[in-house]
Amino acid sequence: MINVGIVGGTGYTGVELLRFLVQHPEVNIQAITSRSEAGMDVAELFTSLRGHIDLKFSDPVESKLETCDLVFFATPNGIAMQETKSLIKAGVKVIDLAADFRIKDIAEWEKWYGMQHACPDLVAEAVYGLPEINREQIKTARLIANPGCYPTAVQLGFLPLIEAGIVDINHLIADVKSGVSGAGRKAAVHTLHAEASDNFKAYGVPGHRHLPEIKQGLSRIANKPVGLTFVPHLVPMIRGIHATLYAKLAEDVDLQTLYEKRYIDESFVDVLPSGMHPETRSVRGSNLCRIAVHQPQNSDTAVILSVTDNLVKGAAGQAIQNMNLMFDLPETMGINQVPLLP
Amino acid sequence: MINVGIVGGTGYTGVELLRFLVQHPEVNIQAITSRSEAGMDVAELFTSLRGHIDLKFSDPVESKLETCDLVFFATPNGIAMQETKSLIKAGVKVIDLAADFRIKDIAEWEKWYGMQHACPDLVAEAVYGLPEINREQIKTARLIANPGCYPTAVQLGFLPLIEAGIVDINHLIADVKSGVSGAGRKAAVHTLHAEASDNFKAYGVPGHRHLPEIKQGLSRIANKPVGLTFVPHLVPMIRGIHATLYAKLAEDVDLQTLYEKRYIDESFVDVLPSGMHPETRSVRGSNLCRIAVHQPQNSDTAVILSVTDNLVKGAAGQAIQNMNLMFDLPETMGINQVPLLP
Amino acid sequence: MINVGIVGGTGYTGVELLRFLVQHPEVNIQAITSRSEAGMDVAELFTSLRGHIDLKFSDPVESKLETCDLVFFATPNGIAMQETKSLIKAGVKVIDLAADFRIKDIAEWEKWYGMQHACPDLVAEAVYGLPEINREQIKTARLIANPGCYPTAVQLGFLPLIEAGIVDINHLIADVKSGVSGAGRKAAVHTLHAEASDNFKAYGVPGHRHLPEIKQGLSRIANKPVGLTFVPHLVPMIRGIHATLYAKLAEDVDLQTLYEKRYIDESFVDVLPSGMHPETRSVRGSNLCRIAVHQPQNSDTAVILSVTDNLVKGAAGQAIQNMNLMFDLPETMGINQVPLLP
Amino acid sequence: MINVGIVGGTGYTGVELLRFLVQHPEVNIQAITSRSEAGMDVAELFTSLRGHIDLKFSDPVESKLETCDLVFFATPNGIAMQETKSLIKAGVKVIDLAADFRIKDIAEWEKWYGMQHACPDLVAEAVYGLPEINREQIKTARLIANPGCYPTAVQLGFLPLIEAGIVDINHLIADVKSGVSGAGRKAAVHTLHAEASDNFKAYGVPGHRHLPEIKQGLSRIANKPVGLTFVPHLVPMIRGIHATLYAKLAEDVDLQTLYEKRYIDESFVDVLPSGMHPETRSVRGSNLCRIAVHQPQNSDTAVILSVTDNLVKGAAGQAIQNMNLMFDLPETMGINQVPLLP
């Protein structure tokens, strides 16, 4: 059994980690910390967990996280970078679901996240936790930077095209749509039901924090810098990301076969048969990324459709996938549920 | 032309007042005040109004509201009671869309609203602004207590039954459902889209502030105290109230005829033909209350269905209806739009 | 392993049965029949099941259902009653998720369902599959009439009150709200997204097919006929039922204790602590019924709030709970998932 | 007063036409035809219109449409082309809200719409009813092909860029999202609330009927064929279109100024200040198209955001705008309502 701690368990990634971990056969949840809710029953805040957990939120200082085998940070950006070093020293493995260790270029990170980085040296060591690219490094990592939700869907969508070297990497376009839970469980006006439902809009077109993360990932695959236009949108739904990706083809290749071959051994990437369109609900509550490949009117523009559940493959599920790899468990253990449809 | 001021124009009742007033043929909007947004273009906050208004939010102190003919308070509870007296003294008429002047029993008000009342004497003078009951008093009033959203739908639904004296008034039941805009445009967790959509719940069953307001209204009609169980629910929709009302019949009466006769002269109450069920979208964006009358299986239980748009007949539209009455304008002027369906 | 057949697998109860059964450790799905989709991969119709099932829909005639241990009917009303007798004769157990065997009074059934009953004798034998009431009979039954979605939430809500004999059973009121999936996966105008979303309405107030089923159930508990006013409403959400129940108390009893004691041994009924309000998403995707008990202002009116997922405890999950009982498996096997929240 | 007839008034464009026309000061609605609903009160089908209209649906044959001044066709594709010729002959002007007269290339039309065209000669005469491009021809036209919903938002978005000749017109990308009402008011499974809500997907990527219409329009502006990738998506909302448009810039131009100048005289096109993002609800129920112009990270990719209400500027509102032009009325008459927000 793996003794697990969760720091910051009151947000959506926190409750989603719990949903999977309370039924994971090899996990014991030792502590869930929350400064604001210390002392409250977890199942009182999240009534969906009544009967499945009897822990209380505990104060971070008193939670003895250094005795865990693994600690998940489900905190706002800027927390994990302050507490990870001592945990690592104590022999605890760490998976950060926030952005603290995702960007290798410290100056770039500080520009986008608006704060000074507290432990740049661990950034260098951290492994970017996208198993479909970094599986082997993840297995031996002490510190995982769990990818963002948009970056997961976009990178898995573009990956085969860029690896194959068959597209113009200077003009990639990612038109991406997210459910509202991506904004987190925090009081705000613009994500109120009365504001966000029956409505659709783009946001952050001049610049979004996931842009440098995606560009870093795609540039590594390409082995040179890529040019990317990234436009996120807010969809009136709870969960789900839909990435619509455009790339100009430099060669004539059978895209369907390319994608099927690339992902044939991946448990959590499902390439749909030719001609289909994935829908976000087909992965609701699951760790899957479903992808469809199109080349409309046989033009030189490839259109890739990639969907995930932002809270699962885009956050908590992928974190547990990484945990399974780090602790030599079957990669799908505890995260192989059937999507909830309808 | 009526010179109008609006205090607190940044919430949903504020923007809804503006939607109607910018096209009202007899209204000039002199000022819209907001402490927090003073100096900002109204149309920058509410882009729906671009091209229809070129006012800026102004600081309340500098807005010379005492030169208006009429001031609407679209503020949180507890503001209007502090500023109304000086306006009234200056000859300005006042319509308060909040709760400050709704409850005649000051102690009762203070219990439910958790603060001391700042001007009890004006409470006595204030006219409860439900035109279907108080039309004549409204015409000559200096101060209107505009009814709450739930109380409007519930009172209009029960009114003919209680006036006719044919039901057990000790066991009235109002099972009422509201769209999320009823909670206002303020940052909160429980009304986030990711919390409130694809979900349904009751709230405030032990006690809700609209309970004493409804009981006061129904008791006046009955000329004695009524017993009421009032259960509000939150519906994953933006606008709309649906009241399902239950009353035990003491006599056998043709309910359909009773309702049709009672409301035959009312422009904003529509009694549906026998057998129909009103839906909230049939009044979306309009000042209407639609009512259907049922007596299932010919039992002794009457079931009344009453729907309104909580922001219109339940707030801004009714306020303008009151304004029209106070200034001797046609009652429907500026608020006779067709509901938006679908 | 239990060999299971599903008749009519293309609706919501069908796909929901599959969601649970493909991961049930003691079930082998032998056949899923559909006249209209025979030959199509199940996972092509329901992409959420890709990777979890490789069956095709098969023609009912060729599906050798008589070799199954158990057949679920997830069909429209009127199908199961024609095919059940031969299956029972062949030694196959049957669980009907439709209404064919729910009403003991054949004339009453024929009145509400508008057709002649094809096998009245099996109606007498059929056990009403509400385990919290009929657990022992279910264990030995050959034929289960799986309860309707509204009846499950309403009966579990009223049960302790009526068993205790402390309410006026002549004036029970059930104001019940359902998500749109309750109307099934069939082409229709009134349940289109553009019709049903951002909208709320009552329907079927003069009479709804679940009324006689609920009255039959409550009357059995009371050992005499009950009087019930039942008003269903359509909520713009996918899944979930919220029953708000009203009963006039004849005695002063500690309702909270009454409910907690009644359900203390039930795995799938969760009585919330005093003062709480259940929300439908707290049971989304799960087999739970959560109940809260209120007595507002200490009046003589009890208000019971009861929520379920209409497709799970209101249909497929309860059917599997019955299967577990019939085949002497742990009652929670395969249906103990954590609800999906948010 | 203009005597108006509406053919096919039972769909969403029909009820939306009525919403505007019943309050248009210069319109008398003479007849609304419907084969299926002949004899039914219009306000019985669309309860939102109760009190605003007392017409019944009439049989097309008996409706004397040839005595109207103008007939709107709010019918499925393929109807108007059969009935327009005789109306035109009788001196009646016609506005077709369907696709029958939109595509000049008859063979192309027949390929995409799967039927033979019934009157190709009128296709040549028909004026494409996008006032921002064809205002002068519209004023004198006898027959208007009212543009599709996607084509309106996309063409108005690309127009200034293409007129200015500053983009690569061989690789235009239109990633477009529509509310569900775009699919019409007809029984279907894929647009059920339980299917379409809390979900997002692309559709028609291999080819959509609006593609040739948009390409025709853009090619005319460019005076040569354009290359366009067009990907429509279904958004879980009732109304609204959001077009996210991508074009590679060939020159360095001040895009904000370009757009503001182009649309400065247009009543229904609103160019937002630099840096803003339009949202669909900001035009809900109104005839506006709001546009924002971006050039992220100063790359050579322009990103244009264009929103409309698909039932208004994308259908009924634009039709009335065309009517106003044809009958020499103020262009905004009857369609200048404030959008409904929230």
Image: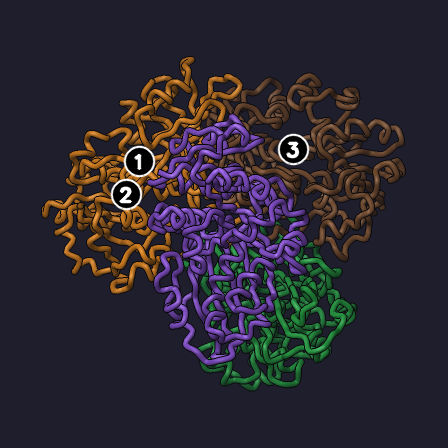
Chain colours: A brown, B purple, C green, D orange
Query: Do the residues indicated by labels 1 and 2 lie within the same chain of the protein?
Result: yes
| Residue found 48% across the figure and 34% down from its top | B65
Q: Secondary structure at mark 1?
A: helix
Answer with left or right where residue B38 lies relative to residue C292. left
Task: Identify the subunit bearing mark 1.
Answer: D
Query: Nearer the N terminus, badge 1 or badge 2?
Result: 2
Residue D99's disc number: 2
Residue A148's disc number: 3
What x and y, as percent, mark residue A95? 76, 34
What x and y, as percent, mark residue A171? 50, 22
| Residue found 45% across the figure and 33% down from its top | B67
Residue D213's disc number: 1
Q: Secondary structure at mark 3?
A: loop
**What kind of residue is marked 3?**
Gly
Residue A308 at least partly seen: no
Farthest residue to the left: give it: D90
